[in-house]
Image (cartoon, coloured by chain):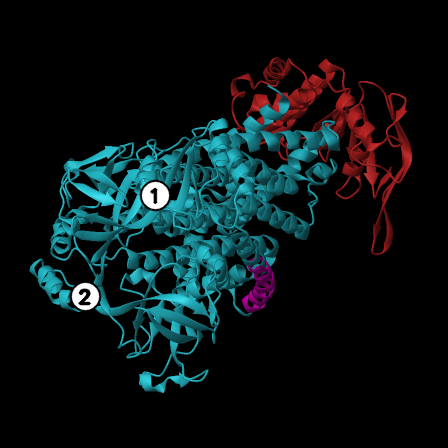
Chain colours: A red, B cyan
Amino acid sequence: MISVSNLCKAVPSPEGQLNILSDINLVLLKSESLAIVGPSGSGKSTLLGILAGLDTPTSGSVIINDKDIVSMTEEDRAKHRSEYVGFVFQSFHLLPGLTAIENVSLPMELKGDSNASCMAINYLKMVGLEARSLHYPQQLSGGEQQRVAVARAFACKPKILFADEPTGNLDQQTGSKLSNLLFELNEREKTTLILVTHDLQLANKCDRTINLRSGKSI
Amino acid sequence: MNISSRVLIRALRAGELNTILWSLCLSVAVVAAVSIFAERIERAIINESKDLLGSDYVIRSSKAIPPQWTDVANEMGLDASRTASFASVVFREERMHLAYIKAVQPNYPLRGNILVSQIPFTVDYSQIQEIKFGPKIGEVWVDSRLLTILDVNIGSQIEIGDAEFEVSNILIEEPEGSSFSILGSKILMNFSDIDSTKIVQPGSRVTYNLLVSSDNETTVSNYINWVSKEIGPHDRLISPEEAQENVSSTIERGRIFLLLAGSIGVVLASVALALASYLFAEKQKTQVALLKTWGMNESQVRELYLNQSFLLGFMGSILGIGLGFLFHLILIDIAREWLPLFLPAPTYKSFLIALVTGLTCVLGFVLPALWHLPKQAPISILKGNVENYSLNSRLRILVGLLVITFLLTFYSENISITIAMIIGISLISLLSALTGGLLFKGASLLGSLFGGIWRIGLSNLWRRRRQNLIQLIGFSTAIFLFLVLAITRNSLLDEWKLQIDDELPNHFLINVSKDQVKGIENLIKDENIISAGWYSMTRGRIIEINRKIITNDQKESHESFNRELNLSWSAAIPEGNKISKGLWWESDWQSGDFQQKDGEEVISPVSVEHDLAKELGLKLGDTITFSIGGLVFYSEVVNTRILDWNKMTPNFYFLFPEGTLQDYPKTSMTSMFIPTDEKVLISEILQAYPTIQIIELDKIFDRVKKTISQITKALEAMTILILFCGILVLIASVHLSVNDRKREAAVLRTFGCNRNKIILVQLIEFVILGLVSGFLGAFGAEAVITLLSLTVFEFSLTLHPWIWFFGPLAGMSVISIFGIYACRDALSSPPLTILRSYQ
């Protein structure tokens, strides 16, 4: 379960403190999905970053499995990410020098998983890219690259999957296919899914939605 | 396979580490090639020198060698052999001659061979025999001309002191020859025969030698350490290096050039490595952020990169050593003709030097570039802007300079080269920073005055100022180092060209009386040989300095106090001589101008050779008293001269004004070039005039010529290797901004800009960077060459106008070509593909 209380994030600016997030509260149960929506600059990615333990808030708490990740040290947050968290990014962020299968297996290898290659090929099969496993990112289309990224995210068996505008760089049709795949795998893996999107169709697929305006939940 | 190796292999496969690996590889290869090559040659030359010396070391003394020294040598397991050399008159009936006798033990020589023949004056190698032992008891081996002088043949008896000996062989050449006087016929006899001659008595002037050798180098060095503590002021230890003085300066200068070239290679490869590492670190920022989102903490990321770097270091070093070994084989192949048949295998030392170089390069250039990478915040991946965490650039330059200093010192063991290089690189970096700042700002302002393409091109210099500054330093360093190498190479070749002139005199005729000159001239004219002109001289012995009689200690300290010296005269400074101290006398100086000093005595001015004056402790104003044919002659040192030995014309250590020595007995000397196939002429001259002396330098000259021509080839091969290093720096520099340039080109193309205009935009930047780098490189090269000329090479100080033209021109052309080539994708691929690939 994820519980967020009184979350605020402010950064200094020439005009004084700039509030990026103000008093955000939410609760998300296991296997639930949450869409964070709002216009550009409303603080969606900042909220996602804090929930994922990539960033820290100015105040407030983020309790995940009874632990406040805000009060953790950076080392502990890294450990937390390693155990609980997976990511899908808008720009895919596949490593250009690695093949599809190597991109998927790398996070597992870093964790010391000896079965990384088998797992990677399984997940590539799930996203329908088994035949492209030895292809490099530049040999794949945008949609295929994002499917590899999705396979990479799920292969680590995260408890929570964070997706930052996963369809943002794809056309509507490819985006729609990708979102179906994301929810299908989410359903199968019983993962908690938190995503940031401008795509209302994608947001509507989620169990819950939080709408941000100027850093506030409305 | 662990994760670090796997990540490394994938990065290598993806080509992300190509420039780093190649830089590392080349850096190690240059060091390995030069170290292995130099080590093998040096060991071979030492072996050859040992043959010339007849042993590994010689201990020379004017007193009898203490028996304990021989005993200790034997106890330590060394071979030891004693020799004694002295001058004595030898007789055959009514005829006599002052000969130089060398008595040797039966095991002489310990290394090398004695060349003998049964045919006098032979130049036919098939008639010459190589043997490894000296004459038997009761036998002597003599110079060919002694047969003519004493009118004897092989098998004849000659008298030395109280004993009679049979002439059993003609002595052609023996090891340790240089220690044997060239001014008399040589005779080799058995050491056991010394006593029977009764020549060597207490107080006799004898040179005693103890020759030692062993195949175990440690045993030899242990003995040398021991005996070094025992030897006194009358003893001298002669190393193999001293046995080859005639070619040692050529080899030494060649070796210094190779070291300089190697050092330049190391610096160039280091700069390439630093640039490539910087570029690699820039590209890794996103990956690090990604790794951190996956839960890796800072220390885990650091460990991953540290492991990768050292694995890469080992891989690059091993590859580099392999490449270096191959390159050293090429160098050996080029120089094969000049090298001894047997080249000793290299020791582990050269390989270790190369490996240490590789790992030090990783420590000094790769790690500082990657050090702050693990600090990359994972959130940066969501924000889309990677942060610029990197080690302070000044600190990195400082670390780089320290590492280069260490590498240069460790590798070249030459502090002058190290200092000159460090000053050069610092100067270039500083000037690049100053010039770059002004240039980029100026270009930006100038660009605003123009429109279109020119504005884009010029303002890009300012927009990419950080990358451009690094490029400017990289480019100018590469150009500077290459110019230093080119100038040094040219100066050395020019200097050596003088020495390999085919018509250089290779024989000296001395002790020729006035009435013999004409006869000799006729003899050589028949063979179409021309002498370098006849120089008159008289022979005198120094008996006092500053009116104090030469002491025994002085006599033991310098050979010149023990023998007659050649004195000559000249109105003007001889060609090629240079006054180092004092003033030359007026050309119309007459003997009547003698200054009157100390009452009645007449004192003539004298010019003394610079080095000899130093060795004898002579200063301007000192008086030297000579004994010439029993008559006393006073002189005062008025100047010292540096001689030019390269021209091989007669040179004199002591010169007087013309006419000063006219009343003393004179002889003449000359030098001439005698080709090998006309060497029989020497026998003819000696048979006709047995009292004259001929110094044959042709073998030494041939060796010098061969050495020079082969070192020249090795030097050219090395220059090509360094050129590759320079190109690597240029490639690494160009790659710093290539992605940005490609993206910019793609954007311009989407706006409909044509190919030529895009090339022009890139050219504006590259041409300006190349021109400025060329000027900075030329400036740095002039500065460093001045330093090297003063400290290492002793070249005459001169400016090199061609580099001010060549440097900027080469910089502009090469950088533009490489730059445009590196960006060629952007001109041919669809713009969208380029934009997507750099998203």
Above or below, B401 against A178 in this view is below
* Quarter of image, res A194: top right
Q: Residues within 10 Å of mark 2 (few under 14, many from 20)?
A: some
| Magenta residues, dominant SS class | helix
Identify residue for label 2.
B513
Task: Residue at the far left: name it.
Answer: B526
At a point 23% along the width and 67% down the height, the residue shown is B667
**Span colored in magenta:** B427-448
B458 or B575, nearer to the observer: B575
Q: Position of residue B10 (x, y in %)?
A: 55, 27
Above or below, B299 against A13 in this view is above
Q: Of label 1 and label 2, which has the lower sequence position?
A: 1
**Can the viewer see residue B574 in this picture?**
yes
Q: Is residue A91 left or right of residue B570?
A: right
Q: Position of residue B259 (x, y in %)?
A: 46, 47
In the rendered image, the quadrant that contains the C terminus of chain B is top right
Q: Position of residue B668 (x, y in %)?
A: 22, 67
The amino acid on which the numbered mark 2 sits, given as a three-letter code, is Ser
In the rendered image, the quadrant that contains the N terminus of chain B is top right
Identify residue for label 1.
B176
**Can the viewer see residue A97 in this picture?**
no
Q: Is residue B71 left or right of residue B523?
A: right
A190 or B59, nearer to the observer: B59
Above or below, B503 against A153 in this view is below
